[in-house]
Amino acid sequence: MTPPKPDSSPCDACGRPFRPEAHPRCYESPYLMLRVCPDCIEAYIRRHAATCVNCQGPILPHSQVAVYKGDAGGTEFGHATVACNPAGNSFYGYWGRGRLESVFRCIEAC
C-alpha cells in the first residue's frame, strides 16, 4: 500500500503552499528536489538564470552548463547540449541560484 500524497507542498521561492500536480507550470528542477509555484516561476528564472554565450537563450537555474574562458579573462557559460556546445575546449559545471556552483574540470576531448 502506498502512502497518501500530501495535499500541498511549500513553494521553495515564497514558502506558500500549493499543489504541484494541479499546476502545469510548476518548475521542478531536474537536478534538485526543488518546486516553485506558478506565481513565482517567471521571477525565479529571471533572477537566477544565466545567458548562453552561444544562442543567447536563458540557462535555467539548477542545470549543467558548459564553462568557457572568455576573451577578457572572464568566464562565459553555455547550454550543455549538442546544439549549443561546440566539441572540445570547455569545462562542465553546475549553474545554481544565479551563479556557478561547481566546475567538474572534465575537458571534453575529440
Image (spheres, rainbow, N blue to C red):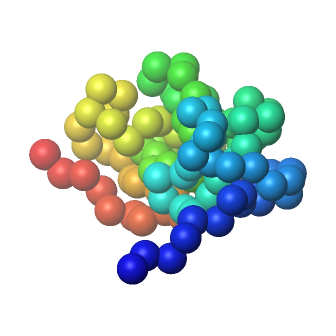
Q: Is residue 23 above or below residue 55?
A: below
In this orientation, which residue lies closer to the viewer: 1 or 83? Answer: 1
In this orientation, which residue lies closer to the viewer: 47 or 73? Answer: 47
Percent of width and height locating residue 47 = 78, 38
- The residue positioned 25% from the left and 43% from the top of the image is 88
- The residue positioned 58% from the left and 28% from the top of the image is 58
From the viewer's perspective, tell me whether residue 28 is left or right of residue 40: left
Quadrant (top left/top right/bottom left/bottom right) for the N terminus: bottom left
Residue 99 seen from this side: no
Residue 13 seen from this side: yes
- The residue positioned 18% from the left and 51% from the top of the image is 109
In this orientation, which residue lies closer to the viewer: 76 or 65? Answer: 65
Q: Is residue 76 above or below residue 90?
A: above
- The residue positioned 54% from the left and 51% from the top of the image is 29
Q: In this view, does 90 lie above or below 41?
A: below
Percent of width and height locating residue 3 = 50, 76
